[in-house]
Image (cartoon, rainbow, N blue to C red):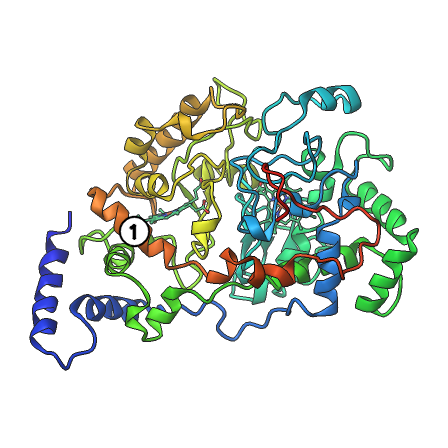
Amino acid sequence: MKKLLAVALAATLLVACSDSNDSASGIDATLLGILDAAGHTADPLASRTLPAITDPKAQLGMKLFYSKGLGGQADSACVSCHHPMLGGGDNLSLSIGVDAEAPDLLGPGRFHDAFRAAQDNNSPYDGGPTVPRNAPTTFNIGLWDQVLFHDGRVESLDKTPASNGAGAGGIRTPDSVYGVADPDSGDNLVAAQSRFPVTSAEEMRGFIFEAGNSNAAVRIGLEAKFNALAAWASEFTLAYGDASVSYGRIADAIGEYERSQVFVNTPWKAYVGGASNSISESAKRGAVLFFSSLQDGGANCVSCHAGNFFTDESFHVLAMPQIGRGKGNNNGVTATDDFGRFRETADLADKYRFRTPTLLNVEVTGPWGHAGGYTTLEAVVRHMLNPATALANYDFSQLNPSIQASHMQINTQFALAQLQTNRSNNVVGVHRDVSFSEADVEDLVSFLKTLTDPCVKDRLCLAPWIPGAADANPDGLRLNAVNNLGNFF
Ligand code: HEC
Ligand code: HEC
């Protein structure tokens, strides 16, 4: 594929080698030139201010985030699916919230207890995962300006860049109709999002919530429960100056905790900042592919994974494997499909489109794809280069056997057909196949791994975001995460 590129690199390399005073080797000069032209600075934070984890609201938010008391059956917390030691996700293809066999066991080995679910709650689910999508990371969540969720159903209505969605147009959520602001959405996209997991039966609410089933009733029920506990009252006083618990405050505090999870100090940033030895030669070759257009022999990943946060915050058809029970969309053959962005906009052009994820810390946020269908970065990269070939060679053995995967090929072929249609219609920004070698895949993966902040792999560095023995446990319902070997995180 990259004859042109190879010639260009060889030429710059020759020049660089012949000049021992030149500190930037040929590939550095090529790459920095491309980045300069693209305006890429590797600094996603820029002038944005986000809360520190020591902020009293973030401290309260942490306690709430780890409390199963926000779950309708007191068996699921936010952290069940978003643990810092699991890359801000759950390390599962598809999440399991309520009715887990062992509520505090996170990551591989967390199973849905079909028997208990049927006995206790008449929940409609089998033993496979109950949540239809992969849990995205909460790391760097304060850097999104436009949309949260794979289908963007929490969305800033102000399309000019704003700080974390807090534009004058307000925020649309599932509590308001498409295009209309939700008056209760709070100050930013993250606070707006944290109003919803507690209302989802399979994530946190369960099937027996005493206060009734509407979103508002669930939140009022939780407010009453938290207001009745003196230990929570003192925590709210520390953060807000008085003891009154409203769901608005719960959502705000949780949002401040999540927004404090800023992990952007990557080897990539150091490299772009001038430390040319901070990434490998393979990663540099991968970066050249990532940032170069198809015409220049590149892979054009940057057309969607754009900017310093590596996302255009927009939606595209990539036909990633559709596994699990889906969102219940009916494609005429199965009722386990997920129509993606179309579910929100009802615009046929949006069928099978999903939001472009950020790639910061992507090394630790697997499995990958909106339904977690890939368990290695190599496989995801091959898919991004050529979706049809990747699907034809899809390796089912990478999935946990409990996952409902019998409809995968049928469902995903519909998305692939949509991709072909969009290509025929020359839809703006449509994905185009790239021819590649396995060495290219290796280089792209090396590049992706330079986007990992070392802190996210270090228990000691992550400690401020994980409550310890010294932190109050107001309702005694803190989730103390343990892995399938019985070790605490
Ligand atoms: C059972 C697992 C589970 C639980 C519990 C859970 N989440 Fe999630 N979370 C998910 C999944 C799955 C998604 C993606 C859903 C979608 O896009 O349709 C998600 C999406 C999110 C997002 C959007 C991320 C992005 O990049 O757009 C945020 C933020 C978030 N969750 C925070 C929370 C908070 C706060 C709580 C507790 C109030 C919580 N979650 C509870 C599984 C869970
Ligand atoms: C046409 C837009 C587009 C192009 C080009 C593109 N991507 Fe993506 N990428 C996406 C979208 C959209 C998703 C999420 C799809 C889904 O979940 O169904 C995604 C997902 C990913 C993921 C998984 C991230 C996660 O958190 O699950 C990785 C890794 C990735 N892309 C890397 C790349 C690389 C490397 C390239 C270039 C070879 C590339 N992408 C090219 C739009 C694109």
Where residue 53 appears, as percent x and y from the top left, is 65, 66
Position of 269 with respect to 232 (left or right) is left
Residue situated furthest top in the rendering: 333
Residue situated furthest bottom in the rendering: 21
Where residue 232 appears, as percent x and y from the top left, is 86, 57
Position of 163 with respect to 80 (left or right) is left
Where residue 124 appears, as percent x and y from the top left, is 69, 21
Position of 377 with respect to 287 (left or right) is right
Q: Please state which amino acid type lies under the numbered disc 1.
A: Leu
Position of 328 with respect to 253 (left or right) is left
Front residue of 252 and 284: 284
Q: Give neighbour class at mark 1: few <14, some 14-19, many 20+ (Cα, 10 Å).
A: many
Secondary element at tag 1: helix
Instruction: Report the image quarter containing ligand 1.
Output: top right
Whether the residue under disc 1 has CB within 8 Å of ligand 2:
yes
Query: Which residue is label 1 attached to?
Result: 444
Q: Quadrant of residue 296?
A: bottom left
* Residue found 47% across the figure and 44% down from its top: 366
Residue 468 visible: yes
Residue 41 visible: no
Front residue of 273 and 211: 273
Q: Is residue 115 above or below residue 140?
A: above
* Residue found 50% across the figure and 38% down from its top: 340
Front residue of 313 and 76: 76
Q: Is residue 92 above or below residue 296?
A: above
Q: Quadrant of residue 142?
A: bottom right
* Residue found 81% across the figure and 41% down from its top: 218
* Residue found 88% across the figure and 59% down from its top: 233
